[in-house]
Amino acid sequence: MSNQSNQNNNATRQWGSRFGYLMVAAGAAIGLGNIWRFPYLAYEGGGGVFLVIYIIVVILMGHPMVEMETAIGRYTGKDTVTCFQRIHKKWGFAGWMAVICTTLLCMYYVVVGGWVAKYAFQYIISGDFGSDKQAYYDQFTSSAVEPIIWTLLLLALVSFLLYFGITNTVEKISKVMLPLLFALLIICGIWALFVNDNAIEGVKYYLLPDFSKFSFTTFAQAATQVLFSIGIGWGLYETLGANISRENNLKSDAIMVSVFDTAAAILAGFVVVPSAFSGGVDIESAGPSLVFNVMTDIFDRLAGGRFIGACFFLAILFAVISSLFSFFEIAIRTFEDNCHMGRRNATILTAVIIGAGNIIVSLGFGKLSSLKLPWIDANGFASYGLYDWLDMFTAYILMPIGCILVCIFIAKVWGFKNYEKEVTNDGKFGRVTLFDKIRTVFLVPFFMIVILLTVFGFIK
């Protein structure tokens, strides 16, 4: 089947505009990793030096992976599994691994998204989280009912909107949601700078690199964060790329998506780091609980804290929803195309599978908290709760392996010559340079190996 005929067969699925695609793709990349995870990792990694390394890794690893995955998707205009199979029939396993990775990730991602929705709602109606923010958080997340209700509400909303197609309703919503997300982050950042007495010290730590703080661990953390934040190695851009017109410049689009994603992470840091410095909070110790425990306490002390808290959690909620649109679409599109289901049945099946996982993971913070899954690394045997185990298995094992497979697929299976024709529109938008090939064959796999060595405890 020719590339042009594939595009004709999928004409009804194409994005309404380049801007619409960029908003959906950037929305997919911008999620909890940017606003929830990036600030505390940046602080832990030395502030400015982490930021510099992060940007370098985005250029060397993040951007080329977005470009390669999008090209694979557009070439056939099909789902994640079929796009590999159409190029080489034995490579469908790479697509199925991506679908499994995303589905497992959604089983905990939607749960945390439900928490965000609850906190945003609480800020809107009262802003009251009690005097002990940790106790409020623990009581809510360990409940057997309320977090599941918020999770399933979020699941139902995303599934309902995707029922009408990602290039229809979702594209229109993303055109509004993503600019609004950036506006909310900017408002929060300006507010934090002007109302915090010691904010300038936080800004200095965050922006001015101190290279004496550099370590190999900092590099590994930055590489891992790029992987998690941009969303590479798990079928995201193959799925979104299937709807792109051949007139689009994939190289330029990949740069724009990477820029949007990095900008959102940096803006989130402008909110969190100065606020935490002003409040005398040790962000490193707070870790992943930073947003729900520490930031609510900080906003309590700020003038207009309820307003800024509502804006901040709404921004996170928009980021979560915009990501889930594309996360769900990976499985929906695969069931629809590869398994020959209709859109309705594919959407329902995806929602049921993810929803069942959501309930189990949510209960893992309460009723099933004693349930542990085994893990083995350089230090021996360990065990983790459902959330932590799924997080490590998806973000730190399946995603890096997925990236390595894509690099092998481009270099050895599809070939750089065929890849160049697709990604440059037969030379219309430049060419694949020697540096591009070096990144594919050496740099990206090296970064992935670093991440795998880190999760298995060989890099501490």
Image (spheres, helix red, strand yellow):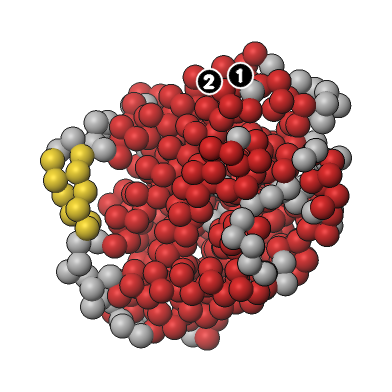
Q: Residue at x 50, y 49 (%)?
A: 96
**Other residues around mark 2 within 10 Å, as few (<14) / some (14–19) / many (≥20):** some
Exactly how many numbered labels are in the figure? Answer: 2
- Residue assigned mark 2: 441
**Other residues around mark 1 within 10 Å, as few (<14) / some (14–19) / many (≥20):** some
Q: Nearer the viewer, residue 226 or 251?
A: 251
Q: Nearer the viewer, residue 189 or 12?
A: 12
Q: Based on the displayed image, in which of its 4 quarters is residue 177 positioned?
A: bottom right
What is the x, y in percent for residue 210? 41, 28
Q: Residue at x 27, y 31 (%)?
A: 459
Q: Quadrant of the C terminus?
A: top left
Q: Residue at x 39, y 79 (%)?
A: 147
- Residue assigned mark 1: 437
| Label 2: element kind | helix
Q: Amino acid at mark 2?
A: Val
What is the x, y in percent for residue 125? 52, 86
Circle number at residue 454: none
What is the x, y in percent for residue 89? 59, 39
Relative horizontal placement of residue 69, taking residue 129 as reference (left or right): right
* Looking at the image, residue 169 lies above or below residue 379: below
- Work out whether residue 36 can be spotted: no
Q: Residue at x 79, y 46 (%)?
A: 6
Q: Nearer the viewer, residue 233 or 50?
A: 233
What is the x, y in percent for residue 457? 24, 36
Q: Amino acid at mark 1?
A: Lys
| Label 1: element kind | helix
Q: CA distance from mark 2 to mark 1?
A: 6 Å
- Work out whether residue 20 can be spotted: yes
Name the residue at the left extreme: 380
